[in-house]
Amino acid sequence: MPLIDLSSPVDATFWEPDPVVHQAMTPAEGARHMSAEMREHLGLEFDPAVLPGGEFLNNDTFTLTAHTGTHVDAPSHYGSKAAYGTPRTIDQMPLDWFCRPGVLLDLRDAETGAVGADVIERALDEIGHRPEPLDIVLLNTGAARHLGTPKYFSDFVGLDASAVHLLLDFGVRVIGTDAFSLDAPFGDIIERYNATGDAGVLWPAHMVGREREYCQIERLGNLDALPRPFGFQVMCFPVKLADAGAGWARAVALVDGTVDGAAD
């Protein structure tokens, strides 16, 4: 069963509002570090020069937010209180939400901003399929083409509250997007709020999470590699970060049959 990687990388060379810091430790530095750690914490003396080439293991330290790269937002990300009780953190979410049949919707023709339930209905009509309860819905907005640049954070399409409610009404509990956010870009949101004074335009997709429990997968990648809009499985288990509002995920699709671009 071929695997298709649906994740975007964590890359310190990418433009990010909160830059990623990558500190690499060479194998030689790792040997010296291990020796120092053994001395400090275990009271052991060890000369790293006796190792072949004076090297042991390399290491990498990344400094980044839990929302960098492909990640799953937990209900606790949306606020401290919810209509359904105390919002759960990412380590509390049921694993079976994150290994389910997938449904891919094409929103690449939509303009920057937020689309409503009518657009989602049309996208579903185009593929002739409706999500089943707990299916994972993926939105291909085309935003991935801007990955690593400032445009990735300003030029994409999100969902309004009606669109999220529609998907949740089908029983969907995980909605994914290749964009920076499931909501519209910040600039679009603030412009519409300043023009209307309507608080309902302020991050409505996230605010729905205070009414109904669901998770978002943001910053997916490679959705164009999926060979069909349904009939595949999605696995996107979040890293178990205790008490966190999000966790990084390596999202993967499992597809029956031969697929161009599939991973080995």
Image: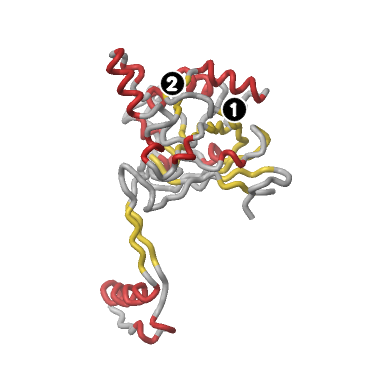
Residue type indicated by callout 1: Pro
Query: Residue 164, relative to residue 254: is it above or below?
Result: above
Query: Residue 14, relative to residue 189: is it above or below?
Result: below
Where does the image place residue 154, in percent across and percent down from the top left?
A: 37, 32
- As rendered, which of 155 and 210 lies closer to the eye? 155
In the picture, which quadrant includes the C terminus?
bottom right
- SS of the residue at dot 1? loop
Q: CA distance from mark 1 to mark 2?
A: 21 Å
- SS of the residue at dot 2? loop
Q: Who's the residue at 32% across and 73% down the image?
A: 33
- As rendered, which of 43 and 199 lies closer to the eye? 199
Give the number of the disc on residue 133. 1
Query: Residue 61, relative to residue 128: is it above or below?
Result: below
Q: Who's the residue at 41% across and 45% down the image?
A: 148
Q: Image quadrant of residue 67? A: top left
Left or right of 75 in this view: 221: right
Give the number of the disc on residue 160. 2
Q: Residues within 10 Å of mark 1 (few under 14, many from 20)?
A: some
Where does the image place residue 121, in percent across and percent down from the top left?
A: 57, 18
Residue type indicated by callout 2: Asp
- As rendered, which of 26 and 99 lies closer to the eye? 26
Q: Image quadrant of residue 31? A: bottom left
